[in-house]
Image (tube, helix red, strand yellow):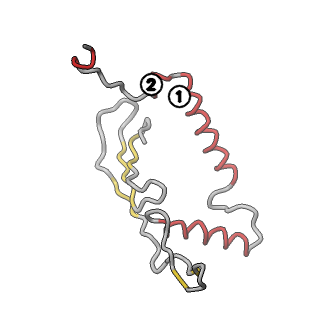
């Protein structure tokens, strides 16, 4: 993610990264970058897929569908905490913040529709053999 104050690098898998790297710059268009700062987010320990049964009634543990799915435990734990405390939303991620992010995504989509050249993938040139 490139911005006016720096760069945020989010490695695979982006939906549940275990680290992000932030590199700050001195101002818009600046070529002076700071040393990258790496933030670590460990996956929760001892979290596994729930046991279920197959069509014969035998217990199985199917595993997760996606890499780092166990990291979604943090979200589930927060939902559980809010539910037990009678909260309608999490103070860690209130609906106002969610709406701000949705507005930002909408603005990016509008920009992409208005500026197709800026958002399109580069075209490959045909080789001379293809042109013949």
Q: Residue furthest bottom?
A: 58
Q: In this image, 101 relative to 118: left or right?
A: right
The residue beneath circle 2 is 118
Q: Which quarter of the image is occupied by the N terminus?
A: top left
What residue appears at the point 39 percent right and 63 percent down from the top-left corner? 40
Quadrant of res 26: top left
Point out residue 128 in the picture as x, y percentages from the top left corner. Answer: 22, 17
* Vertical side of 4 occupied by 75: above or below: below
Point out residue 125 in the picture as x, y percentages from the top left corner. Answer: 29, 21
Point out residue 11 in the picture as x, y percentages from the top left corner. Answer: 37, 53
The residue beneath circle 1 is 112
Other-residue count near label 2 (Cα within 10 Å), few / some / many at <14 / 14–19 / ≥20: few
Quadrant of res 27: top left
* Vertical side of 44 occupied by 108: above or below: above
Other-residue count near label 1 (Cα within 10 Å), few / some / many at <14 / 14–19 / ≥20: some
Point out residue 64 in the picture as x, y percentages from the top left corner. Answer: 49, 69
What residue appears at the point 44 percent right and 25 percent down from the top-left corner? 118
Q: Earlier in the sequence, mark 2 or mark 1?
A: 1
**Front-lying residue, 70 or 79:** 70
* Vertical side of 98 occupied by 68: above or below: below
Q: In this image, 7 relative to 110: left or right?
A: left
Pointers 2 and 1 in contact (C-beta within 8 Å):
yes
**Front-lying residue, 79 or 37:** 79
Instruction: Please tell me whether mark 1 sits on a helix, a strand or a loop.
Output: helix
Residue 18: mark: none
What residue appears at the point 56 percent right and 22 percent down from the top-left corner? 114
* Vertical side of 76 occupied by 20: above or below: above
Q: Residue furthest left?
A: 128
């Amino acid at each position: 993610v490139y911005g006016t104050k720096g760069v945020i690098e989010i490695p695979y898998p982006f939906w549940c990264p275990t680290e992000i790297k932030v590199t700050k710059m001195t101002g818009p268009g600046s070529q002076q970058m700071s040393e990258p700062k790496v933030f670590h987010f460990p996956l929760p320990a001892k979290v596994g897929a729930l046991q279920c049964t197959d069509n014969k009634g035998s217990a199985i543990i199917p595993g997760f569908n996606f890499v780092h799915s166990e990291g979604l435990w943090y979200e589930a734990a927060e939902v559980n905490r809010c539910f037990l405390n009678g909260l309608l939303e999490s103070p860690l991620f209130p609906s106002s913040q969610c709406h701000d992010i949705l507005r930002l995504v909408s603005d990016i989509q509008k920009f992409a529709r208005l500026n197709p050249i800026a958002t399109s993938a580069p075209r490959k040139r045909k080789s001379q053999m293809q042109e013949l």
